[in-house]
Image (cartoon, coloured by chain):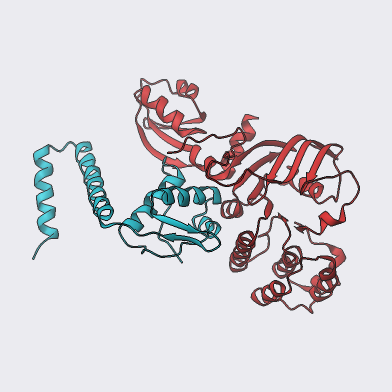
Chain colours: A red, B cyan
Amino acid sequence: MPNIKVKSNGCYDGIWGEPMEELVVHMKGIVKERGKLRIGPMDLDIPKGYVTAIVGSNGSGKSTLMNMVMQIIHPDQGQIELLGHTLAGDHQWELKRRIGYVQEQSWNDQNGDTLEQIVNQMKYWYPTWNQALYERLVTVFEIDPKQRLGKMSKGTRRKCEFIIGFVHEPDLLLLDEPSSGLDPLSWKIMLDEIRAYMDRGERAVLLASHIIDEVKRLADYVVFMHRGKLLGKYEKDQLMDDWKALWVEAGPELNCESLRRLGGVMALENEGRNVVKIVTLDVTLTEKALEQAGLRILRTGGVELDEILTYLIQQS
Amino acid sequence: MWIPIQINENSAEPLYHQIEVQLRSLILSGQVEEGTLLPSIREFANDLKCSVITVRRVYQDLESEGLLRTKQGTGTFVARVGSDERDRHRKTAVVEAMESAVDVGIQVQCTKEDLKAIFQEVLDAKYKG
């Protein structure tokens, strides 16, 4: 087995022959005040060729983060490098042409427009506009391009918004709660399209979500946010591997509280009948410690991403 | 194409390892034939709900074992597996299954003789006629 060097941010270091990560977004020392919420200070790198998901509840600051990447708002402090260019408070239109944004909330400004009207303006603005892709998506999503957006159902409108943000095949695709309002079949189609788009070139997706299925299906990296603070960036599968629930045989003479001090233990619950449930962020470490203490593991279980976030929030 | 691999999220075994073991088995047993084009890394990752980092690792590990080969621009294919290797794999699979069975026997406190008798019973029943 190769000797794996895992950096503190959970990223593997290019040991399997692929080139070192190129970044689409590099944020340093970012601070933004939004009413009562203070976002940052934070550093965040979004690598090319991968899907990075920002996971957090509503009000965690993830949409604000997306808006800063889109240059819709600017940070109060800190620096953002986007696709290799430093953002300096002025709008860099060439960069905007290379980004696609599917926002969480619909634009009321677009209520009176049809998809056809919107698209007719857009195709001249984006040099990478893919007409064939547009036509295929309109068919596959069963959209009437002559219908006004304001008159559409939520799901249909969402599909239009996706097409608008997606069809120029941007270098960076920002998705804010993409599956919101979608029926399962449409979501599956969207997932397939995002996958095919990633396969067609060196792109990056930045996904903001609090829906676990979205994150599990799409994400390679996960960034946790809570109340404007970054709780950490992890490689998704490493997280799923490391965090486990262990049910341990705990005889009456065992001081259960002492188990809390074992390496990796995040939480402990006495379930009665001589069984203690431990949640660990490092299953290998905790298993070893339990073995040394002569304790038997009865059962192992996975820990879901939203549970992991809860534990990280508690710890912070 | 669909490859029958199941991830057990409850297991303490890392994801990449679970996938590797199953894919290796499918290839060595011949269930996924030589020359088969495997799904793209991202397609496979989506199917399995894991990241491309994991799938890339699996493809690269199995390629260095000689079970897969990648053609730049086309994809990853199942390589030719020698019959020696197939036989070795068959034997390993059976040995591992038997070891698990004996472990269960030990857990419920069977003796060696108990287990031999049970094994003979099962063998006779399965190879009947």
Q: Does the rendering let one see residue A77? A: yes
Q: Which residue appears farthest toward the right when viewing the image?
A: A90
- Please identify the quarter of the rendering in which residue B103 is found: top left
Res B19 seen here = no
Looking at the image, residue B13 sits to the left or right of residue A17; the answer is: left
Above or below, B106 relative to B28: above
Residue at 48%, 57% in the rendered image: B70
Horizontal and vertical percent position of residue A296? 34, 30
| Number of disc labels | 0
**Residue sitting at the far front:** B72
Q: Is residue B109 above or below residue A205?
A: above
**What residue is at 33 percent from the left and 62 percent from the top?**
B31
Q: Position of residue A252 (x, y in %)?
A: 36, 23
The residue under the point 30% across, 58% down is B29
Direction from residue A260 to residue A111 in the image, left or right: right
Compared with B123, A129 (above or below) is below
Q: Position of residue B6 (x, y in %)?
A: 41, 54
Quadrant that contains the C terminus of chain B = bottom left
| Residue A25: quarter of image | top right
Q: Identify which residue, A48 or A184, lies in the foreground.
A: A48
